[in-house]
Image (cartoon, grey):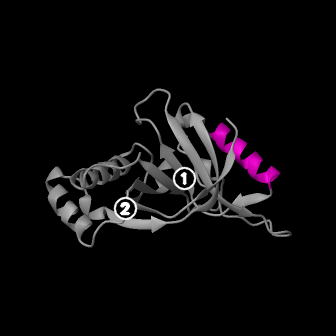
Amino acid sequence: MTPQLVHCDPVTCLNVTGMGEPGGTEHVSAIGALYAVASVMGGPASPLEGRWWVEDNSRPPLEVPRDQWRWHLLLPLPDVPEPGAVEAAREQARASGTAVDRVQVVTFTEGECVELLHEGPYSEEKASLDVMETFMAEHGLVRNGLHHEIYLTDFTEPEPKTLLRQPVRRARIGNGSAARPAPGRG
């Protein structure tokens, strides 16, 4: 599939922020907390999403050990919840045993983004990310935010489908600096 340039409006989500490798204890706990709170609120409106980054500037992001990857895990909501709704849902979900106190509501805007559908194992995402990088370079675009993934299939699928998204802006002439690329899940 060919990357495309899209515009993404503001989105309100349930969010848990953390650090650790995909599928690790911290990551799985955060997913459980999101779904526990979302279930009390009437269920997730959209697939699970993740925004990823690293804070190690000494090496390329995919060379940073996965246990040092940072993330925001998200479940988009259809609307901004009424005041107190998330707090009430956390309280009701507390019996689930998950870390529901970490769940919060956030709203963010990415604006212009490059998107590409990755079909296949997470370990092969680098090839798709490279295609996106080439597209960005050809169109005079640089990173302008966190690497974003939308998980269109369950994590246990042998051939998962993941929508890869990278917020971008037009490159400034003479400015070679851009945000550090974030890791894909691969």
Asked if the magenta segment contains residue 16, the reply would be no
* Residue that mark 2 sits on: 79
Give the crowd class for mark 1: few <14, some 14-19, many >=20 residues within 10 Å: many
Question: Is 22 left, or right, of 39 in this rendering?
Answer: right
Residue 156 sits in quarter: top left
Which residue is painted at 17% across and 63% down in the image? 91
Q: Which quadrant holds the C terminus?
A: top right
Q: Say which of marks 2 and 1 sits in front.
A: 2
Asked if the magenta segment contains residue 137, the reply would be yes
Image coordinates of residue 109 in percent, x first then y, are 54, 65
Q: Find the residue positioned furthest to the bottom.
A: 83
Q: Secondary structure at mark 2?
A: loop
Q: Secondary structure at mark 1?
A: strand
- Position of residue 47 relative to residue 75, above or below, is above
Which residue is painted at 43% across and 29% down in the image? 157
Q: Is residue 69 visible?
A: no
Q: Amino acid at mark 2?
A: Asp
Image coordinates of residue 85 in percent, x first then y, are 24, 66
Which residues are the magenta region? 126-139
Residue 103 sits in quarter: bottom left
Q: Which quadrant holds the N terminus?
A: top right
Give the crowd class for mark 2: few <14, some 14-19, many >=20 residues within 10 Å: few
Image coordinates of residue 13 in percent, x first then y, are 40, 60
Question: Is 56 left, or right, of 108 in this rendering?
Answer: right
- Residue 148 badge: 1
